Image: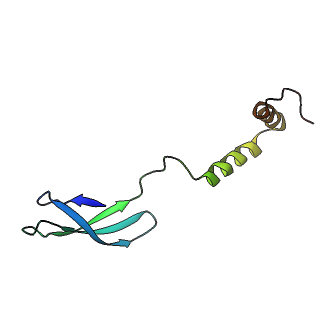
Amino acid sequence: MRCKCRFCGSVARITSSNEISLEVTHLYCQCTNPKCNAVTVRDNSYSHCLRPPIDDIDTLFLDRFNSMGKEQQQQLLRQMTGNNTPLN
């Protein structure tokens, strides 16, 4: 990964990193412009999730399913299987 030098706008390369937490990492960047050669620290942080891991989706579904009443559970199962007969 590369970034721009905030001083001269040239390409800066990441020379090392330091994980502060699961959500924040300090990136040590050095400008590739020999006339600038600035070294800076940037924060790389977690923002948000666009799609949770599959295991999380399964857990969310099971939690929601278990919170439903028996009739709602049976109705959902009938819809999922394409079966319109009541489940015993």
Residue 74 vertical position relative to residue 34 in the rendered view, above or below: above
Residue 57 vertical position relative to residue 25 in the rendered view, above or below: above
In-image side of 63 versus 24 (left or right) = right
Which residue of the protein is positioned furthest toward the top in this rendering? 84
Q: Position of residue 30 (x, y in %)?
A: 20, 69
Q: Nearer the viewer, residue 11 or 48?
A: 11
Q: Position of residue 1 (x, y in %)?
A: 31, 61
Would you identify the image quadrant in which residue 85 lies? top right
Residue 8 vertical position relative to residue 67 in the rendered view, above or below: below
User: Looking at the image, which residue is at 83% across and 33% down?
Assistant: 71
Q: Position of residue 55 (x, y in %)?
A: 64, 54
Q: Quadrant of the C terminus?
A: top right
User: Looking at the image, which residue is at 24% across and 66% down?
Assistant: 13
In-image side of 37 versus 83 (left or right) = left
Residue 53 vertical position relative to residue 16 in the rendered view, above or below: above
Would you identify the image quadrant in which residue 83 lies? top right
User: Looking at the image, which residue is at 14% across and 69% down?
Assistant: 38
Which residue of the protein is positioned furthest toward the right in this rendering? 88
In-image side of 44 versus 10 (left or right) = right
Q: Position of residue 84 (x, y in %)?
A: 84, 26
